[in-house]
Amino acid sequence: MTVHAEPLSGRLLALMFAFLVAACGAEVAAAFDAPLVASQSGTLLMLSDGPVEGQSRAHTRSFIGIPYAAPPVGALRWKPPQPVVPWSDVLEATGKGVTCPQAPDSGLNTGPQSEDCLQLNVFAPAEPPATPLPVMVWLHGGANQIGSANTFIDRTALLGGATQPLRLHDGAAFRDFAEREVVVVTVNYRLGALGFLAHPALTAETGASGNYGLMDQQAALRWVQRNIAAFGGDPQKVTLFGQAAGATDICYQLLAENSDGLFDAAALQSGSCGSLRLPAAREAEADGRDWAAALGCEHDNLGCLRRLTAEQVAQVPLASRDELGALAVIDGHFLSEQPVHALRDGRFNQVPLIIGNDTSEGVASCAARQLAARVSRFTPVFLYSFARSAAYPELPAQFNALPSLDELWIWNVFSRLSPYAADDTNLSLQMRGYWTSLVDGDVNAAAQRWPRAEWPRYSRERESELVIDLALSVGEGLRTGCCE
């Protein structure tokens, strides 16, 4: 289907869409499933499911809350993500966005919680690019129990004064001064029991259960393949990057059935799956049965489970099935074997990888080394340690002690919180230069607007890694002693 490059009025675009669907029925529905091949100008775009209206600020058009799957409510709760029902009225993608249900005491400042949360955000250049741009798709952290694509930082609490909360994972901030122009996507996916419950009655219903949140992520990546060209993005240059549980989930996406072609590079920040033993289906189902009984739903009664409110479900967390709280299951459908076996033998999506963590994260440090050693036989790997401290006097001491601090530099957070030291600005720019170059197969590939150290490819023989601090440096075998 060819999409007009000229902007159309919202009413005209909606009328055209409604007319086409009414006139051509299933034929047009099939056409909308095909990838869009023309980028469009302005903030009103026609996507495969219907028209959306975003907003423009600075050098970025933002689109908040675009559905990539049907609301997982009612009979669709604990089902694989289903296709969106196409719409004809213009979808206003200009709000704060929603958050998938989670414990209310998570401490995060997020958008309103809703079980209708399978939505994503897109941040694209103000003007359609002459050639398609690389795409960066972000998976948030939070142990797959909490978190959101729509988390906000309360500047008032940190700095005083009446200030507006800031979006933590703001694609416009990521795009600012990046090494190259990119399109950024941030994704919501089901969390906790809504996203990862395994239960014998659910398995009997569909053949497998658990891993719904991971299926959501894959559905979002398929949405990117179908739609990102409309924003100026290249579906053949997609980098999947994430932090903590988001990084662990990326590791599972490397192993997942049907993941080939959905992304072309991946960056795992403070998370991996190379050393984890995941529960088999029956083990996870037994845990799920205990979880359901705690909520008064015994005797494998799916009707009882689906009558529970989302708030009731979120109040009772699933027991963490490993030390990182990743919650995934070997279900025989999405994941078929233990990660350690698949990674060791090369049965994974062999794309270029960035793997690393903060120097303060002991367990994550060794897990990153182990993963790098396993997969470097098959694909380019770039290992890093993040050593820079966030010790700003304006920030509370507990903030500086948080793990995975590197995400604050990747997302250009400090520049929006407080006066940003020139050296840290440069470090943030250098990091985004590496991250956005990975999709070319080499983090050193792009033309360097901001000079940075040559980052050597990891090998088991030399164990080279980049130490990210105000002065970038390269070391060898830095993790050997503590990990062995």
Image: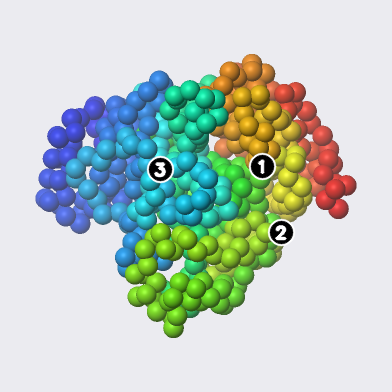
In the image, farthest residue toward the bottom: 299
The residue tagged 1 is 403
Question: Nearer the N terminus, badge 1 or badge 2?
Answer: 2
Residue drawn at the location 67% of the way across and 65% of the way down = 277
Q: Nearer the viewer, mark 1 or mark 2?
A: 1
Cα distance, mark 1 to mark 2? 20 Å
Indicate the amino acid at tag 1: Pro
When the figure is inspected, residue 378 is found, relative to residue 335, above or below; the finding is above
The residue shown at (69%, 42%) is 357
Label 2 secondary element: loop
390, above or below 403, in the image: above
Residue located beneath label 3 in the image: 111
Residue 180, percent from left and from top: 53, 25
**Quadrant position of residue 374:** bottom right
Q: Residue at x 15, y 46 (%)?
A: 18
CA distance separating discs 2 and 3? 34 Å
- The image quadrant where one finds the N terminus is top left
Residue 278 in view of the camera: yes
Residue receiving disc 2: 275
> x, y percentage for residue 2?
26, 38
Say whether disc 3 or disc 1 marks the residue closer to the N-terminus. 3
What colour scheme governs how the chains and residues are painted in the rendered image of this protein? Answer: rainbow
Q: Image quarter for residue 88? A: top left
SS class of the residue under badge 1?
Answer: loop
Tags 2 and 3 touching, CB below 8 Å: no
Query: Residue 85, located in which quarter of the rendered image?
Result: bottom left
| Amino acid at dot 3 | Gly
Give left or right: position of 93 versus 201.
Answer: left
Furthest residue in direction right, as rendered: 481
Q: Secondary structure at mark 3?
A: loop
Q: Is residue 328 visible?
A: no
